[in-house]
């Protein structure tokens, strides 16, 4: 498996609480089911779980802040023009 695929799997763990719970219950199995290589699975088993959870919370907070941010004036104008 390539580095982008591993990064994609990590991104899923950061953003999906259910995937994180399954990973916590069976890290090797979940990493293997995600198609990671044996070396990558071994690395995932050793990952800092507290750090993973902290990063997930941090990213979730950033997404929530971004979602609450008002749209820029020019996007508002464009949306009015296309109605």
Image: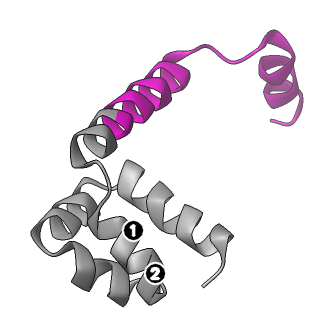
Q: Which is more toward the observer, 18 or 13?
A: 13
Q: Do the residues labelled 2 and 1 touch (CB within 8 Å)?
A: yes
Q: Is residue 52 magenta?
A: no
The numbered dot on residue 22 is none
The numbered dot on residue 43 is 1
Q: In which quarter of the image is the C terminus?
A: top right
- Residue at the spot of label 2: 39
Q: Is residue 55 above or below residue 10?
A: above
Give the residue drawn at x 65%, y 70%: 3
| Residue that protrudes farthest toward the left in the picture | 25
Which class describes the residues within 10 Å of circle 1: few (<14), some (14-19), or many (20+)?
A: some
Magenta stretch, residue numbers: 55-83
Q: Position of residue 5 (x, y in %)?
A: 60, 74
**Left or right position of 20 against 16:** left
Q: Is residue 82 above or below residue 16?
A: above
Element marked by disc 1: helix
């Amino acid at each position: 498996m390539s580095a982008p695929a591993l990064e994609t799997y990590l991104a899923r763990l950061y953003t999906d609480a259910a995937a994180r719970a399954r990973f916590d219950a069976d890290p090797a199995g979940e990493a293997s089911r995600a198609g990671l290589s044996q070396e990558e699975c071994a690395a995932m088993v050793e990952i800092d779980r507290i750090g993973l959870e902290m990063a997930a919370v941090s990213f979730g907070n950033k997404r929530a802040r971004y979602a609450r941010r008002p749209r820029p004036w020019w996007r508002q104008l464009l949306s009015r023009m296309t109605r």
